[in-house]
Amino acid sequence: QVQLVESGGGLVQPGGSLRLSCLVSGNIFKINEMGWYRQAPGKQRELVASITSSANTNYADSVKGRFTISRDNAKNTVYLQMNSLEPGDTAVYYCKALVVTRTYYQNQYWGQGTQVTVSS
């Protein structure tokens, strides 16, 4: 079994910052790509940012220059630093990881989500 647990969401004013964390635990041999997605009410889930095992990153156009994704491989953790937050960033944020288990089975796993609300 593999578990993903997100933390760091909350309520912040426009222009503020938040840092999300996602800890991956369980039957892990290797973690390949990790990413953050978000889903706003009435909208489809969308990619926010992703990072490969070699730290290559990819961002949605809407967050470029404001959000930074990073990972700590020793801690099996991925982070999302969010600056200059806007009301349009309000959503449930989900962590996703592509994990190779100790039996060399690869699958993608999702966290339970953490709410981010940007409002004055």
Image: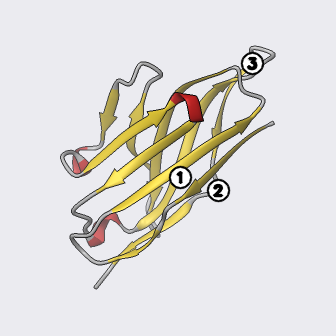
Relative to residue 119, is residue 102 depicted above or below? above
Q: Is residue 45 visible?
A: no
**Residue, disc 1:** 94
Tag 2 or tag 3, which sits nearer the N-term? 3
Residue marked by disc 3: 105
Secondary structure at numbered mark 1: strand
Task: Kindly report the distance in space between the C-alpha atoms of the residues bearing marks 2 and 1.
Answer: 7 Å
Task: Name the residue type under label 3.
Answer: Tyr
Q: Are marks 2 and 1 in contact (CB under 8 Å)?
A: yes
Asked whether 75 or 6 is in front, the reply is 75
Residue type indicated by callout 1? Tyr
Against 21, residue 16 (above or below) is below
First along the sequence among labels 1 and 3: 1
Give the SS element for disc 2. Answer: loop
Kindly identify the residue that appears in the image at 49 percent across and 40 percent down. 78
Percent across and percent down for residue 62 are 23, 51
Q: Tell me the kind of residue under disc 2.
A: Gln
Q: What separation in Å lies between label 1 and label 3 (alpha carbons)?
A: 22 Å
Q: Is residue 94 above or below residue 69?
A: below
As drawn, the residue found furthest toward the front would be 74
Q: Which residue is mark 2?
A: 112
Q: Quadrant of residue 19?
A: bottom left
Q: Residue at x 25, y 68 (%)?
A: 86
Q: Quadrant of the C terminus?
A: bottom left
